[in-house]
């Protein structure tokens, strides 16, 4: 049973396109996250979200937007894709608040922008 | 702003050795610290979580310690095996918890058979 799943696993697209990455967790968690791992393998938080609050990392361009249709899903929409958006994107989740709990990560989506 | 540093960046040791991976963080006001393993082209596997009130956690051959006052954590791997080869990441949860984890750049570990 997959705890945190992402689709697609690989995404190749051209500059200027709009794309979405889906994330689903079946753990009953209340908080979900998106992280970006760049070409140097450095992981950075992009967003955290629970039912009440969206926290956006100030360095994330507004071309990126998370959308949560329900508590189990947090999708990532990216508009006007740029070459620099090429990276691996990880979704994660944790129980309510997340302050003291483990974060569980999905397998990642490798995005390549050409 | 929290910053996490991991030393060494890479480590290669013969099978069977005990080893220590180091992690330091600049803001001691953390909620917890989590150690992960990442295999090439794969996602992150959580290894150990240490709450801010704890000093260490153990799982099998792994032991993680936390010293908040000095801003340090170590991951001790006993009797290393080739299957332990991976990148090990430490990450601190601080500030508002909803800010997410701050990761180090990882230690790339190779265990020689």
Image (spheres, rainbow, N blue to C red):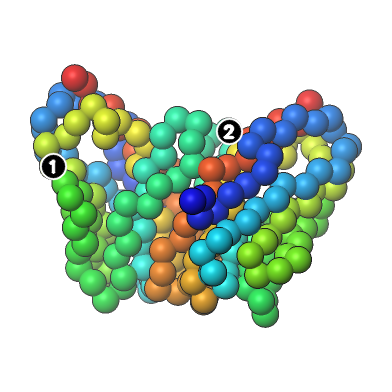
Residue occupying the point 16% across, 46% down: B61
Q: Chain of mark 1?
A: B
Residue occupying the point 63% across, 37% down: A9
Measured from the top left, where is residue B25 in percent x and y? 36, 59
Measured from the top left, where is residue A100 in percent x and y? 40, 73
The quadrant holding residue A58 is bottom right
Which label belongs to residue A107? none
Answer left or right for A50 relative to B71.
right
Is residue B58 shown to the viewer in this render?
yes
The quadrant holding residue B20 is top left
Is the residue at mark 2 from the same chain as the one at mark 1? no
Q: Chain of mark 2?
A: A
Identify the element where label 1 is drawn: loop
Answer left or right for A73 relative to B94.
right
Work out which residue is located at the far top of the displayed protein and give it. Answer: B113
Which label belongs to residue B78? 1
Marks 2 and 1, how far apart in space?
A: 31 Å
Is residue A57 shown to the viewer in this render?
no
Looking at the rendered image, the quarter that the C terminus of chain A falls into is: top right
Residue identified by numbered label 2:
A39
Q: Residue A48, relative to residue B41: is it above or below?
A: below
Mark 1 neighbour density, 10 Å: few (under 14) some (14–19) many (20 or more): some
The front one of A52 and B12 is: A52
- Total marks in image: 2
Residue occupying the point 76% across, 62% down: A67
Frontmost of labels 2 and 1 is 1
The front one of A19 and A47 is: A19
Measured from the top left, where is residue A106 in percent x and y? 54, 49
Work out which residue is located at the far front of the displayed protein and give it. Answer: A1
Mark 2 neighbour density, 10 Å: few (under 14) some (14–19) many (20 or more): few
Identify the element where label 2 is drawn: loop
């Amino acid at each position: 049973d997959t705890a945190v799943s992402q689709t697609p696993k690989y995404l190749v697209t051209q500059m200027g396109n709009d794309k979405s990455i889906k994330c689903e967790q079946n753990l009953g968690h209340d908080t979900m996250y998106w992280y970006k791992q760049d070409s140097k393998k450095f992981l950075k938080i992009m967003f955290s979200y629970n039912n009440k609050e969206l926290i956006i990392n100030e360095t994330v361009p507004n071309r990126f937007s998370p959308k949560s249709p329900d508590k189990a899903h947090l999708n990532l929409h990216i508009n006007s894709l740029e070459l620099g958006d090429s990276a691996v994107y990880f979704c994660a989740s944790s129980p309510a608040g997340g302050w003291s709990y483990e974060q569980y990560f999905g397998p990642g989506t490798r995005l390549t922008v050409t | 702003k929290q910053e996490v540093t991991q030393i060494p960046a890479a480590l290669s040791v013969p099978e069977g050795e005990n080893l220590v991976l180091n992690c330091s963080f600049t803001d001691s006001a953390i909620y917890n610290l989590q150690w992960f393993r990442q295999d090439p082209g794969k996602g992150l596997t959580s290894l150990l979580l240490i709450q801010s009130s704890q000093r260490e956690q153990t799982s099998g051959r792994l032991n993680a310690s936390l010293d908040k006052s000095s801003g340090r954590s170590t991951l001790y791997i006993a009797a290393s095996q080739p299957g332990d080869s991976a990148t090990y990441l430490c990450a601190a949860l601080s500030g508002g918890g909803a800010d997410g984890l701050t990761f180090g750049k990882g230690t790339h570990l190779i265990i020689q058979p």
